[in-house]
Image: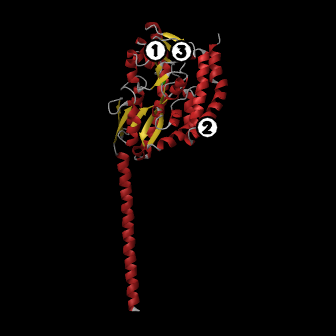
Amino acid sequence: MKRNNLITKLSISFLAVCLIMTAGCSKQDGQEKGTTEKAKATKVHHWKMVTTWPKNFPGLGTGANTVAEMITKMSGGRIQVKVYGAKELVPAFEVFDAVSSGTAEMGHGSAYYWKGKNEAIQFFSTVPFGLTAQEMNGWLYHGGGLKLWQEVYAQYNLVPAAAGNTGVQMGGWFNREINSLEDLKGLKMRIPGLGGEVFKRAGGTPVNLPGGELYTALQTGALDATEWVGPYNDLAFGFYKVAKYYYYPGWHEPGTTLEAIINKDAFDALPADLQEIVLSACKVANQDMLAEYTARNNAALVTLVNEHKVQLRAFPDDVLKELRKISDEVVAELAAKDETAKRIYSSFKTYREQVDAWHEISEKAFLRARSLK
Ligand code: CA
């Protein structure tokens, strides 16, 4: 009996010690967790942003700067983003790999530069005869596009965000008039993405070069023609000194989305509020760049035509119709390449059909109404 009592007493004492220890441990766990959360919330992150643009280049480079400044300001300095122009840290076309591997935490460029990784990626940049800026944003934010983009980029350890849009681009700079498809034959032209593939099938030789190398390539004759963006950007590069004809519209880039890419490990390490700040800053920059181009393009065009005597030309309808036909084939072939491309194309196509129907009686009808005299 006595022995049993002793065992019971010992058991109770042991249990009590265990309970006290457990309580102590969970209190300690809680404190540690709290301390970790606090450290996470107050930690200052120094991020590098590598870009495909020349440093501070109007619209594009400054658009990347806007993303960086917004993140730094909105986070109260908890994330400090330093921007590097092309070649400062890595060459323009190594931005994707640099961010994917963590050499830099962020990048700014456009998805079609990385078609060598996965051709389907080009849908997130622009598609010939595809979506305008407004339509592209509708697809990305409310039509399932961004979700697909995130899914594809997660395979490369990246988080993507739309972070700029050029609006409808110009068709490009030529030293010969384009009166039929024949005139594109044999031309060596800088034209990236799916537009380049269409140009190739039309008989040309597409080349992809970073913006900073285009002027010299045209001047030395390494290129016969080039497209870049629109009057605001093209004036800054001085293409009017080396090419005579400036064609419109940019059938190949009707509303190119610029992207911010974020290293997924760096993004996941952020507390929730900073993650939201990073994505919101991209959204603001996405809208702001389009507003800037919309506001500045025409003044630049007037300078090009009046001061620099650039010959403004429209592609003939027959040429556009042919290019449209080839574009549909190119995009459909891309969609048939694999399951991912098929899913993205299906989402894109469904969205384009419905937005096209809506814009027929809204944007297009209004612009027509406004031009009635
Ligand atoms: Ca372009």
The amino acid type of the residue labelled 2 equals: Ser
Q: Image quadrant of residue 77? A: top left
292 lies left or right of 40: right
Q: Which residue is mark 1?
A: 300
Mark 3 CB lies closer than 8 A to ligand 1: no
Q: Residue at x 64, y 28 (%)?
A: 356
Residue indicated by mark 2: 346
> Alpha carbon of mark 2 to alpha carbon of mark 3: how far?
34 Å
Earlier-in-chain disc, 1 versus 2: 1
Q: Which residue is mark 3?
A: 183
Q: Quadrant of the C terminus?
A: top right
As shown in the figure, which amino acid type bears the numbered disc 3? Asp
Q: Is residue 108 above or below residue 298?
A: below
How packed mark 1 is, by other alpha carbons closer than 10 Å (few <14, some 14-19, many 20 or more), is some
The answer to whether residue 83 is left or right of residue 371 is left
Q: Tell me, yes or no, if residue 253 can be seen here.
A: no
Amino acid type, label 1: Ala
Residue 21 screen position, x and y as percent: 36, 70
Rendered location of residue 31, percent (x, y): 36, 58
Q: CA distance from mark 1 to mark 2?
A: 38 Å
Q: Are marks 1 and 2 in contact (CB under 8 Å)?
A: no
